[in-house]
Image (cartoon, rainbow, N blue to C red):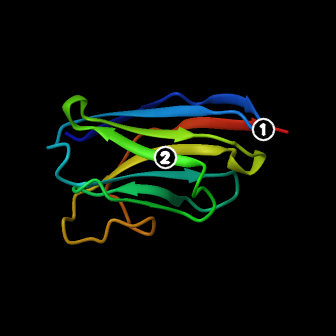
């Protein structure tokens, strides 16, 4: 079965950096749209970065220029490098996969499978 395991979250001061990782298994990694999503307390879960099967990336405006999504197909792993972190980046961060190959791989996509999440807390 599909398994997604995030790691790398933690607490950091504003302006700092974190790198999230997602170890994927149970499916043909590299064949589907992958993405990072986040959910702050009391808010909806939003897409922030996606990468399609050709390696094309898309970002939410709120993170563009600060966050970078990448992957290592050989390791079946997805990454999110987060720089210049702000207190408003505080949220639970989720890795996700979209197994609908007809879906557009944008931050508005609706994934089918999710990881358990990793908490990121940014203090001012």
For the C terminus, the image quarter is top right
Is residue 68 found left or right of 18 in the rendered image? left
Residue 4, given in percent of the width and then of the height, sits at 34, 37
Residue 84, labelled with which disc? Answer: none
Residue position marked by numbered label 1 in the rendering: 14
Q: Are marks 2 and 1 in contact (CB under 8 Å)?
A: no
In whole angstroms, how far apart are the C-alphas of marks 2 and 1? 17 Å
Please give the name of the residue rendered at 19% of the width and 43% of the height, measured from the top-left corner. Answer: 29
Q: Residues within 10 Å of mark 2 (few under 14, many from 20)?
A: some
Which residue of the protein is positioned furthest toward the right in this rendering? 124
Q: Is 57 located above or below residue 91 in the figure?
A: below
The quadrant in which the N terminus is found is: top left
Q: Nearer the viewer, residue 2 or 29?
A: 29
Report helix, strand or loop for mark 1: loop
Residue in front for this viewpoint, 77 or 115 = 77
Task: Name which residue lies at 52% across and 32% down.
Answer: 19
Tell me the tag on residue 68: 2
User: In front here: 45 or 59?
Assistant: 59
Q: Residues within 10 Å of mark 1 (few under 14, many from 20)?
A: some
N-terminal label among 2 and 1: 1
Which residue is located at x 60 percent, y 49 percent?
Answer: 66
Residue 106 pos. (x, y %): 39, 67
Q: Position of residue 32 (x, y in %)?
A: 22, 54
């Amino acid at each position: 079965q599909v398994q997604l395991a995030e790691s790398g979250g933690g607490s950091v001061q504003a302006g700092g950096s974190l790198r999230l990782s997602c170890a994927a298994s149970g499916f043909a990694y590299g064949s589907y749209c992958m993405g990072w999503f986040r959910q702050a307390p009391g808010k909806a879960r939003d897409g922030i970065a996606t990468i399609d099967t050709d390696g094309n990336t898309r970002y939410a405006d709120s993170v563009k220029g600060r966050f970078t999504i990448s992957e290592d197909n050989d390791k079946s792993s997805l990454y999110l490098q987060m720089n210049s972190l702000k207190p408003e980046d505080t949220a639970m961060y989720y890795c996700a996969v979209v197994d609908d190959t007809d879906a557009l791989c944008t931050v508005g996509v609706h994934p089918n499978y999710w990881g358990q999440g990793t908490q990121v807390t940014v203090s001012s």
